[in-house]
Image (spheres, rainbow, N blue to C red):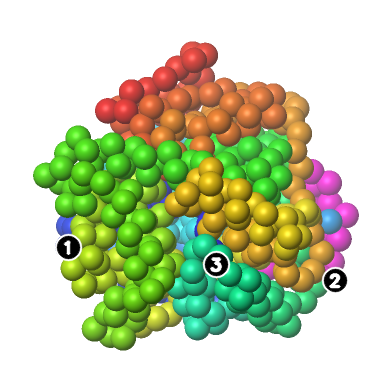
């Protein structure tokens, strides 16, 4: 189960905090908004919540105050009859809870407003990400110029983490999914992958039924405007990563005159259908792996699987299919777990050395690092429990998707992509099964211009595996008001990575200064 539109850039921040002695426990999703949920259309009722950063990273960031709130939004915005920008009542469909956190610096001055944050996924927690980004530039967070002029407002979209979370896939099924052969060649093996997708779809349909279509991106974009109103902003300033670029682009189309500034980093091309999007990711991960392999060749002292890292990974996958290594706790490092360890490590250049060590240790009979890398991607805790990241990821992706290929076409793509993209093509093709058996109606997002919106900054990274760079100019062109900023770096998403990127994005957020056309920032 590949996150088709996902990565939390704050993972790098989290890793830094772990190295600094803090821990990041996997927390069970919060299932209710508590007694202080504000009604639909109300201003957020903020309450201090210093426990949130303590739960996530062991401490609060210096000079930062943390307040939390929960607002109610209509489950079905269309059913309310509300038009863009208009108030809505919940009608007969009830409400969802949307969890918010506001991080405010005690050194705040000349406040501009709120900076809404979405980390991607879909399924990533904006509450968690706002906490990570509040730790400042020294730990990979946002620059002081930003945190001292804006409130950081993280929100968990509907269905995610603390916001009326979707949870319908058992931990056992998720283990089966992540551990399954990434390239099931025989018909029996492929049929096993089909059966797994059918069971997951049936379980989620039994639990949520017709409500599943309500987790669409368009519904979440309308929630964003309710968040804007609840925090008291006349216009929205937004930082969206990966899938968050799709959410932000949808918002801009629905509420163009409510936009102050949107930074869309790690762009998705909304016009691509699911097949084109999956093939694009297969191509992107192959490029990222080639870049990793070239790094191994240049720095063999840091890469224990040099001089042939592709051969080492291919060999590890082949051996995992025949005789997977067993960990001390009884888990077996099947091909699926090895593959997700590889994928997890390619999201950031800083993960390359961990990947090399993990594959080398696996060859020596120790799968622990492989499991650590794969579990980090899957949000699987040491106790075997998962967050609701992938429940939400599936619910949102499938609500959005109105066209899924049939089984013969998926099988055909698996064969074709194995030739074109040997490591990642089969996994991405088989991943098309995810929505094949998903129940419920669909609610596709719009794909048009943000007519009436101000310039929107679209940021792309040339070495991005998950949202390949070619999506960046496509999204900018679709919006009509998109302005491209390029980072010639590695990994998924660019801000805040280098002084050049930071200077350009900060100037846009603070002063609405758009980078010159063709601006490109070097890798370092």
Mark 1 touching mark 2, by CB under 8 A?
A: no
59 relative position to 515: left or right: left
90 inside magenta stretch: yes
Question: In terms of secondary structure, where does tag 2 sit?
Answer: loop
Query: Mark 2 — residue?
Result: 92
- Distance CA(mark 2)–CA(mark 3): 46 Å
Q: Residues within 10 Å of mark 2 (few under 14, many from 20)?
A: few
- Distance CA(mark 3)–CA(mark 1): 41 Å
Where does the image place residue 379, in percent across and percent down from the top left?
42, 68
User: Which mark lies nearer to you, 3 or 1?
Assistant: 3
Query: Mark 1 — residue?
Result: 21
- Range of the magenta residues? 79-98
Query: For residue 184, which numbered disc appears in the image?
Result: 3
Tell me which label, 1 or 2, sits earlier in the chain: 1
Hey, which residue is sitting farthest bottom in the picture? Answer: 330
Q: What type of secondary structure mainly makes up the magenta span? A: loop
Q: Quadrant of the C terminus?
A: top left
Where does the image place residue 432, in percent across and percent down from the top left?
65, 59
Tell me which label, 3 or 1, sits earlier in the chain: 1
Q: Which residue shows up at 52% across the image and 14% down it?
A: 517
């Amino acid at each position: 189960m590949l996150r088709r539109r996902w990565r939390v850039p704050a993972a790098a921040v989290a890793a830094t905090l772990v190295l600094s002695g803090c821990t990041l426990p996997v927390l069970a999703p919060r299932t209710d908004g508590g007694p202080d949920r504000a009604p639909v259309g109300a201003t957020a009722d903020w309450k201090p919540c210093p426990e949130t950063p303590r739960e996530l990273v062991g401490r609060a960031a210096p000079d930062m105050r943390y307040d939390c709130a929960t607002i109610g939004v209509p489950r079905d915005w269309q059913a309310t009859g509300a038009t863009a920008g208009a108030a809505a009542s919940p009608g007969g469909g009830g409400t969802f809870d949307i969890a918010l956190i506001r991080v405010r610096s005690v050194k705040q001055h000349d406040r501009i407003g709120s900076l809404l944050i979405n980390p991607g996924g879909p399924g990533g927690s904006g509450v968690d990400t706002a906490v990570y980004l509040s730790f400042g530039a020294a730990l990979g967070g946002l620059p002081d110029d930003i945190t001292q002029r804006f409130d950081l407002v993280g929100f968990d979209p509907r269905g995610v983490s603390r916001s009326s979370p979707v949870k319908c896939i058992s931990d056992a099924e998720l283990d089966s999914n992540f551990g399954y052969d990434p390239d099931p060649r025989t018909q029996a093996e492929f049929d096993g992958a089909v059966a797994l997708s059918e069971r997951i779809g049936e379980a989620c349909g039994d639990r949520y039924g017709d409500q599943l279509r309500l987790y669409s991106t368009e519904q979440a974009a309308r929630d964003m405007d309710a968040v804007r109103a609840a925090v008291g902003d006349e216009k929205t300033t937004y930082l969206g990563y990966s899938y968050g670029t799709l959410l932000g682009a949808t918002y801009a189309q629905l509420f163009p005159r409510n936009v102050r500034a949107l930074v869309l980093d790690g762009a998705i091309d909304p016009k691509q259908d699911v097949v084109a999007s999956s093939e694009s990711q297969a191509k992107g991960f192959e490029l990222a792996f080639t870049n990793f392999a070239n790094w191994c060749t240049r720095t063999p002292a840091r890469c224990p699987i040099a001089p042939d890292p592709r051969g080492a990974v291919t060999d590890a996958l082949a051996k995992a299919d025949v005789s997977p290594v067993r960990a001390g706790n009884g888990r077996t490092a099947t091909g699926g777990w090895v593959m997700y360890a590889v994928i997890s490590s390619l999201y950031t250049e800083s993960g390359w050395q961990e990947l090399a060590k993990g594959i080398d240790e696996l060859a020596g009979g120790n799968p622990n690092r492989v499991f650590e890398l794969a579990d980090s991607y899957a949000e699987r805790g040491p106790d075997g429990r998962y967050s609701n990241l992938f429940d939400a990821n599936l619910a949102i992706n499938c609500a959005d998707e109105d066209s899924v290929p049939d089984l013969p076409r998926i099988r055909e793509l698996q064969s074709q992509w194995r030739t074109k993209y040997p490591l990642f093509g089969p996994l991405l093709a088989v991943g098309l099964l995810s929505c094949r058996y998903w129940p419920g109606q669909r609610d596709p997002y719009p794909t048009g211009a943000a007519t009436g919106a101000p310039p929107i900054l679209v940021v792309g990274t040339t070495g991005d595996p998950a949202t390949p760079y070619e999506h960046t100019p496509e999204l900018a062109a679709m919006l009509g008001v998109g302005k491209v900023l390029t980072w010639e770096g590695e990994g998924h998403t660019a801000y805040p990575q280098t002084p050049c990127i930071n200077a350009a994005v900060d100037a846009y957020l603070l002063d609405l200064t758009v980078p010159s056309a063709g601006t490109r920032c070097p890798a370092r």
